[in-house]
Image (cartoon, grey):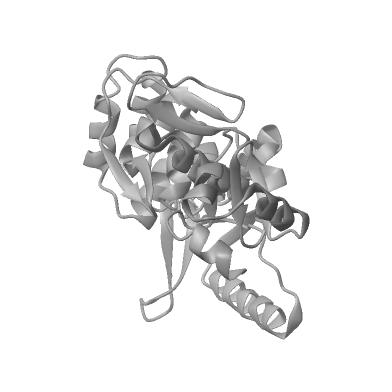
């Protein structure tokens, strides 16, 4: 990175605003040069980012959130899924083109790139990576209330697994929502969360099975002949020999990839040799609810114990 840009972004982890130019002795002409030479990219009007371009919408939203937090300072705090990203938590089925924040002082309104929420009471504010944000538990409650059960469960599972949040902390955050819009979905989320959901796909697979009325066990240990666990399946339908796993975007290219594929095949063979059936689900299949329901029902009926 250009040394001037290193100094310019030192306070905000890779983002800066126009006011930072003046504060560090730089000019608009220098900014135009950096933009032209692609040392800098524009996140939105008046907000800029440096470093490698992110590959997904989460990366772009993270730039936008950090930049707007820098721009507006103590007048806002990141919230909802903008806050989830700052806390390193998973997101699902939420709008990624607009940063989310709560207003912490008067005079702030929503704009094309920033949605301002006005909670009934100001939530606890913490600082993560130099950015003011609501707590992880509050962000989970906000996402469930604002965007529904599945986005909320994915966020909650991620908080339980990655940050070791307690159920009590999330429940308390839901309680602080009061009786506002969406609080019903947030309360149902409390009944459906599970730390065994270690990725969004695993959480959604569990919800699909539960919606069909099946009791499930996450991170199910498969035992060898000596009673020792040699594998953990994402999901077991209780009362059956049916195990399920979500298969994300794992790549098997190159020598290391081929070795990983071989080891996975050995693992699956060992699982099946112990009398378990193992089915895999990918993102496309999660989206086809009727077809997935048919697969789950067929496996449960065939493999009942």
- Is 264 on the left or on the right of 175, as rendered? right
Q: Is residue 17 above or below residue 244?
A: above
Question: Quarter holding the N terminus?
Answer: bottom right
Q: Which sits in the foreground, 283 or 222?
A: 283
Residue at left 47%, top 29%?
149
Examine the rendered structure and indicate whether residue 149 appears above or below residue 277.
Answer: above
Which residue is found at the position 64% from the left and 78% from the top? 260
Q: Quadrant of residue 220?
A: bottom left
Q: Residue at x 32, y 40 (%)?
A: 137
Percent position of residue 109, x then y: 48, 19
Q: How many numbered tags mark residues here?
A: 0
Residue situated in front as seen by the camera: 294 or 301? 294
Q: Is residue 210 visible?
A: no
- Relative horizontal placement of residue 155, taking residue 293 as reference (left or right): left
Q: Is residue 158 left or right of residue 242?
A: left
Q: Nearer the viewer, residue 238 or 208?
A: 208
Where is residue 204 shown, x and y percent of the image?
A: 54, 42
Q: Return the x and y of residue 174 as percentages of the image width and height.
A: 29, 28
Q: Is residue 38 above or below residue 179?
A: below
**Residue visible at 49% across and 63% down in the picture:** 7
Q: Is residue 230 visible?
A: yes
Q: Name the quadrant containing residue 190.
A: top left
Q: Position of residue 275 (x, y in %)?
A: 53, 67
* Relative horizontal placement of residue 125, taking residue 273 as reference (left or right): left
């Amino acid at each position: 990175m250009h040394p001037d840009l290193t100094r310019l972004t030192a306070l905000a982890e890779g983002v800066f605003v126009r006011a930072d130019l003046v504060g560090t002795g730089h000019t608009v002409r220098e900014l135009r040069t950096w933009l032209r030479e692609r040392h800098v990219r524009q996140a939105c009007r008046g907000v800029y980012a440096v470093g490698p371009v992110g590959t997904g919408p989460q990366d772009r939203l993270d730039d936008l959130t950090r930049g707007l937090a820098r721009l507006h300072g103590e007048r806002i705090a990141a919230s909802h899924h903008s806050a989830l990203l700052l806390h390193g938590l998973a997101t699902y089925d939420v709008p990624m083109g607009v940063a989310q924040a709560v207003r912490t002082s008067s005079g702030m309104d929503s704009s094309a790139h920033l949605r301002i929420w006005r909670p009934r009471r100001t939530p606890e504010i913490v600082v993560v990576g130099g950015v003011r944000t609501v707590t992880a538990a509050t962000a989970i409650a906000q996402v469930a209330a604002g965007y529904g059960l599945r986005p909320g469960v994915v966020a909650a599972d991620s908080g339980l697994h990655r940050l070791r949040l307690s159920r009590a902390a999330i429940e308390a955050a839901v309680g602080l929502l009061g009786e506002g819009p969406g609080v019903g979905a947030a309360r149902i989320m409390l009944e459906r969360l599970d730390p065994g959901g270690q990725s969004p796909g695993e959480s959604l697979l569990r919800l699909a099975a539960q919606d069909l009325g099946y009791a499930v066990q996450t991170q199910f240990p498969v035992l060898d002949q000596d009673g020792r666990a040699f594998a953990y399946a994402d999901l077991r339908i209780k009362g059956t020999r049916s195990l399920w796993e979500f298969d994300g975007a794992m790549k098997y290219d190159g020598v290391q990839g081929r070795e990983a594929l071989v080891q996975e095949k050995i693992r699956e063979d060992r699982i099946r040799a112990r009398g378990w059936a193992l089915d895999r689900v990918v993102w496309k299949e999660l989206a086809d609810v009727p077809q997935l329901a048919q697969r789950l029902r067929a496996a449960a009926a065939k493999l009942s114990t």
